[in-house]
Image (tube, grey):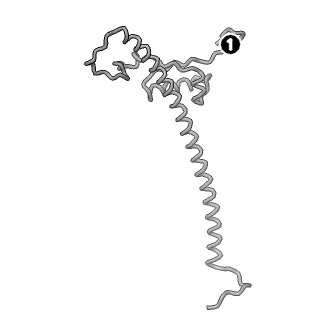
Amino acid sequence: MSAPSSGRRLSGGMGESVNSLAGRRATLSTDDDEARTELAIIAYFHRLTTQMLSVMADAVDNSEQERYEDDEDEDTEAAVDENEESSPLQRGVTSREELGPVQLGSHAVESMGLDVWNGHDAHFVRELASLYFDREVRIEGKGVEVCGVRVC
């Protein structure tokens, strides 16, 4: 076997192989860019969803904590039956109406990454609370004040 001379050009299989690899690298680069874009979009919506659910969970917990503190005051006045098998967390509450609505301020809606002024966002928050937490929400809208007088 003899070594190829230095003046000889690559032809046939080797040249085509190198060109096909270069084309494949361009395709992989495009695929990598698309994959990065898809992952960025998925990560964005994951963070947004986590943020919304966290803010809503905090509001529901605060609402239940306020209710629990109110019940605790009533319990000191009434006798407690030790044989009663009710959960201390639920205190016998079984329906949404008994729990009362969760008050959600405009700052909480902003913290969710939503628009305080948008009616569709308010509807979304109500549906979110209903589906995930089985609770009713009252959203305290952000009003406009002129010289200390609330206009809307």
Question: For this rendering, which residue is in front, 152 or 74?
Answer: 74
The residue singled out by tag 1 in the image is 145
Where residue 116 sits, quadrant-wise, is: top right
The quadrant in which residue 97 appears is top left
**Crowd tier of the residue under label 1, counting other residues whose Cα lies within 10 Å: few below 14, some 14–19, many 20 or above:** few
- Relative to 46, say whether 138 is above or below: above
Quadrant assignment, res 26: bottom right
Please tell me which residue is depicted at 61% across the width and 48% down the height of the picture.
37
Give percent across and percent down for residue 101: 47, 18
Give the number of marks.
Answer: 1
Q: Is residue 110 left or right of residue 134?
A: right
Q: Is residue 4 above or below residue 62?
A: below
Question: What residue occupies the far left of the structure in this picture?
Answer: 83
Kind of element beneath mark 1: strand
> In this orientation, which residue lies closer to the viewer: 130 or 103?
103
Please state which amino acid type lies under the numbered disc 1: Glu
Q: The C terminus appears in which quarter of the rendering?
A: top right
Q: What residue sits 64% from the left and 91% below the top?
A: 2
Specify whether 110 is left or right of 92. Answer: right
